[in-house]
Image (cartoon, rainbow, N blue to C red):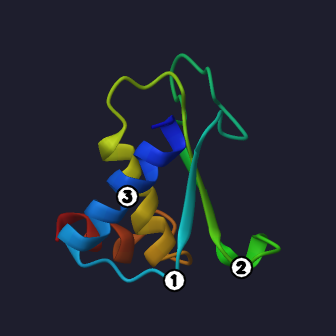
Amino acid sequence: MNREEWLTQAAERIVGALGLKTDGFRFSVGFPSTRALSKNRRRLGECWPVETCDDGVAQCYVSPVLKEPVGIVAHELLHVELPEARHGAAFRRRCKE
């Protein structure tokens, strides 16, 4: 099993366990578009919502520097479910659930 397969299986389990509502997603290992190696504010994941993707499937990236990416996978899945929320109140409320 490669990393993308592992990430996808983990994401599918998280979706089921948390009851997330998504229309699909893809996970890959890769550096985020900004601050990938920043010392102070390193970005560890990134979600590109469906409207930015030609095939209409959200694309999520997880940094290869992570040893344990499950928390980042869950975080990015919340972005898939709530693409307009960014890190605002609705996003934080859903995180607490």
Q: Is 48 above or below relative to 82?
A: above
| Residue lying farthest to the top in this orientation | 39
Q: Tell me which residue sits at (54%, 33%) in the image.
A: 63
The extreme right residue here reads 54
Residue nearest the observer in this picture, 87 or 29: 29
Which quadrant is home to the N terminus?
top left
For label 1, the residue is 23
The answer to which quarter of the image holds residue 90 is bottom left
**Which amino acid does the dot numbered 3 rest on?**
Ala
Q: Residue at x 50, y 21 (%)?
A: 65
Q: Is residue 46 left or right of residue 3?
A: right
Mark 2 vs 3, N-terminal side:
3
Quarter of the image for residue 17 reads: bottom left
Mark 2 and mark 3 residues within 8 Å of each other at the beta carbon: no
The image quarter containing residue 48 is: bottom right
Tag 3–tag 1 contact (CB < 8 Å): no
Image point 31% across, 43% down: which residue? 70
Q: Secondary structure at mark 1?
A: loop
Separation of residues labelled 3 and 1 (CA atoms): 13 Å
The x, y position of residue 89, in whole percent, is 36, 73
Cα distance between the residues tagged 2 and 1? 9 Å
Q: Residues within 10 Å of mark 1 (few under 14, many from 20)?
A: few
Element class at badge 3: helix
The residue pinned by badge 2 equals: 56
Query: How far across and down, in percent of the image, does residue 81 sit?
Result: 44, 77
Distance from disc 2 to disc 3, alpha carbons, whole Å, reads 18 Å
Nearer-N-terminus badge (3/1): 3
| Secondary structure of residue under mark 2 | loop
The amino acid beneath tag 2 is Gly
* Residue position for label 3: 11
| Image quadrant occupied by the C terminus | bottom left
